[in-house]
Image (spheres, rainbow, N blue to C red):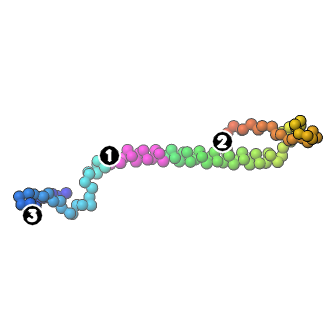
Amino acid sequence: MNARKETDEANPGASVLMLDDMERNLPSVPCYKLTAIAAPLMNHLKALMQVIQDQQLELNTVKQQLYHYKELAECGSRDRSVSEETLTECSTEPHPQERKVMTKRQRAPSVQPFS
């Protein structure tokens, strides 16, 4: 960038610093300084991108497991055996003949990787 002094016509005796127009599109900071700033930021962004990709892969795995267990639960609910259901009488109701079907509390299966 070239600078030159010119006299100010409004103030006789004062000078004004003028810049050449030919280099206005160029950055005023040297490239090595920009690289020193940008390189650590790019490394940080790459690391963040890898973390996001790993979490997305883990999320997809958990979704597959969820759908798998959901399908198992739907298939299992139709094929319940008598041992999985407990019949109890409700003594507070006026008709002791009626029985209320109460299912056993199902234990949540531990999450295992779906292969």
On the question of residue 24 being in view, the answer is yes
For the residue carrying disc 3, how many other residues have a C-alpha within 10 Å: few (<14), some (14-19), or many (20+)?
A: few
Range drawn in magenta: 35-49
Residue 5: percent from left, percent from top: 11, 58
Residue at image position (18%, 61%) is: 20
Residue 111 in picture, x, y percent from top left: 67, 39
Q: Position of residue 104 (x, y in %)?
A: 80, 37
Local SS, label 1: helix
Q: Is residue 56 left or right of residue 108?
A: left
The front one of 62 and 6 is 6
Which quadrant of the structure image shows residue 76? Answer: top right
Q: Which residue is mark 2?
A: 113
Residue sitting at the far left: 13
Please tell me the numbered disc located at residue 9. 3
Numbered badge on residue 53: none
Residue drawn at (26%, 58%) of the image: 26
Residue 38 located within the stretch drawn in magenta = yes
* Whether label 3 touches label 1, CB < 8 Å: no
Q: Residue 36 shows which numbered tag?
A: 1
